[in-house]
Amino acid sequence: MLRRLDRRRTKANQQSDRIDEGYYLASQWQLIWRKFRRHRLAMLSAIVIIFLYSLAVFAEFYSVNDYHKRHVKYAKAPPHTVRFIDEEGNFHLNPFIYDMTQKLDMETLKRLYTEDRSKRYPIRFFVRGEPYKLLGLIDTDIHLMGVDEPAVFFPFGTDELGRDLFSRTMHAARISLSIGFLGMVTSFVLGCLIGGVSGYFGGSVDIIVQRVIEFLVSIPHIPLIMALSAAFPPEWSSTQVYFGITVVLASVSWPPLARAVRGKLLELREADFVMAARISNMGDMEIIVKHLLPSFASFLIVVLSLAVPGMILAETALSFLQIGIRPPAVSWGVLLQDAQNIRSLSQSPWLLIPGLFVIATVLSFNFLGDGLRDAADPYKQ
Amino acid sequence: MKHYVFQRLIYMFFVFWLVSVVTFVIIQLPPGDYLSTYISRLEQAGEELSEEEAANLRRQYGLDQPLFARYLKWIGQVLQGEFGFSFDWQKPIKDIIGERLALTFTIAILSTIFTFAVAIPIGIYSATHQYSVGDYVVSIIGFIGLAIPNFMLALIMLYIAWKNYGLNLTGLFSPEYLDAPWDMAKVGDLLLHLPIPVIVNGTAGTAGLIRVMRGTLLDELNKQYVITARSKGVGEVKLLFKYPVRVALNPIVSGLAWLFPSLISAGTITAWVLGLPTAGPMLVRALITQDTFLSATLLMFVTILTVIGTTVSDILLVVVDPRIRMERAAS
């Protein structure tokens, strides 16, 4: 303890007096924010997550083509190579692509694509294209990227039916990312409620709830989720399936959360600072608002940020196995269905690109959770 | 000790009963019952069923009785080893699930061993070499292992094996050994196919375990007794393995209890991609074709296997850590 204080003092001495004063006057949240900002990887992850969610919110703006439209001429086309240097070796500041033409190899029946180097198609930014409603409110037709007709731009290539994988990935982010978030909120409410009840009442209620949780944890998650979501009636609409899956994911993932909430509650109730507050004649309400909630909130944020990736992975796996989100709705798992066997994978490896988005999301949430945990821990410098 | 094991076994059987109830609920969950599916199949095949015949069938299968009675009837049959009939496979369920469950269990156990064999040494290394290049490399690889969905890792490994070595490693056996009797060549073939499922299943757990091992070992290494031992001139290797590593192993052993369910879980999806003849793909197919009895039976057995694994790990933990033994005995 003394050593820690010492270290803090030397560190503080190195900084200017003004910052020094700020450090001691800072509230708990300000301290957390300071520590979090120092955690570079977590900051980067936060930015990546914000970026990914922006893809989901403004999917129409980011997409290059209509994500349902089938471009028959370009089925299973590889991603376009974005170029800066043309045939003659001239450098162009504005990146451009060459149009592709399809040829069917009559022996292997494989589609081969060759670039037509005769005409450059510069990538235009903020172009007008398909009309859509931004945020479902504002009518507009401006897209981030596009090329002049008759060429069509496929940054990530196309799938078997010639649909633009890039635009599909953007739209899929919507379901994949929001299901993680919604599922987390639902299981958070359930977990807090049940864990809170268990921790608050104690006694036999506590014992029963704990046994139920132990039982639920011992059932393997994925098979259970699969069994539950396979029970959805086939006539359900995409929206119903979407909410159904959210509920299933949440109902399976609340037990560990409830256990954590209960454990933390019991620990906090006995903590010295709560005792000190009680001795100094603080009311129950004041203790809860001023002491319990802040220590609890930081803990919850950490737990939640670590719970989201599990949900996203589960949804991806379900949709991948064709018992989750059903086409024509798209999620990253639905897109990955096309890459299920070696043959399609060896012919068109770009079909795995949506998987990279899953990895980026899960990694970012993990790093963010780690950073938040370090920042929220008052004993860590 | 005996008392504790006995208690744990009683609890295990109680959980088995709960599992059977949940399974039964899941069988009843989908809209319509298996009989209406069956009747509509008969009608599609051109057979006419009168109201009376349908009612007779209903009575024969006990569908006119209340839920509670049906549960008792079902559990009675299950205890006698009759799990019902798989419509999809056109075979009694007990004939088709045995081998698959054995393989599922084998792969889960092998993955557990793999996870421990990889995670513990790496965890020790990255704790003793904190903030070194090796530590960072291991952490990054661990995180990536955590983030890649299992099925994607499986796909990528298959792709690499196929692209570079021309090997098609889907399934557990090459086609020529599929129905062959067991001999050395078949075992060799199995050994060639096993690494991918084991590695793929193991990676996610490995990453988590490395972090737990690293964290607890670091905490332990900063404690006074380590400094005391060092000041007395105890060698670094002996210092490390005498106490800190043993203490740090504790959370890992207790982690077995959750590692096992997650391995079975993860195995379900990997097995689908890899085309393994385990319970996972069979379950997926049964769910898609709404072969309810098969899927519910599989779910029940997978859960029971998990509960057995968890119980074993709990008992192991008590064997390993005398402190827990005291605590449990006291309570």
Image (cartoon, coloured by chain):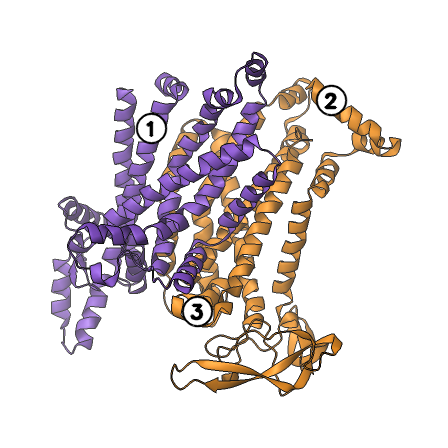
- Residue, far right: A17
Residue A246 visible somewhere in the drawing: yes
At label 2, the amino acid type is: Leu
Callout 1 amino acid: Leu
Quarter of the picture containing the N terminus of chain B is: top left
Callout 2: chain: A
At 36% from the left and 39% from the top, the residue drawn is B113
Location of the C terminus of chain B by quadrant is top left
Asked if one can make out residue A213 in the rendered structure from this viewpoint, the answer is: no
Q: Quadrant of residue A49?
A: bottom right
- Provide the secondary structure element on which disc 2 rests: helix
The answer to whether A162 is drawn above or below residue B249 in the figure is below
Give the chain coloured purple.
B
Q: Are marks 3 and 2 in contact (CB under 8 Å)?
A: no
Identify the residue at image location x=53%, y=65%.
A353
Tell me where residue B274 appears, x and y as whole percent.
Answer: 35, 58
Q: Which residue is mark 3?
A: A346
Q: Which residue is more in the foreground, A333 or B76?
A: A333
For label 3, the SS is: helix
Which mark, by number, is residue B316?
A: 1
Q: Colour of chain A?
A: orange
Amino acid type, mark 3: Ser
Q: Is residue B197 left or right of residue B56?
A: right
Determine whether label 2 and label 1 are within 8 Å by CB.
Answer: no
Q: Quadrant of residue B35?
A: bottom left
Asked if labels 3 and 2 share a chain, the reply is: yes
Residue position for label 2: A5
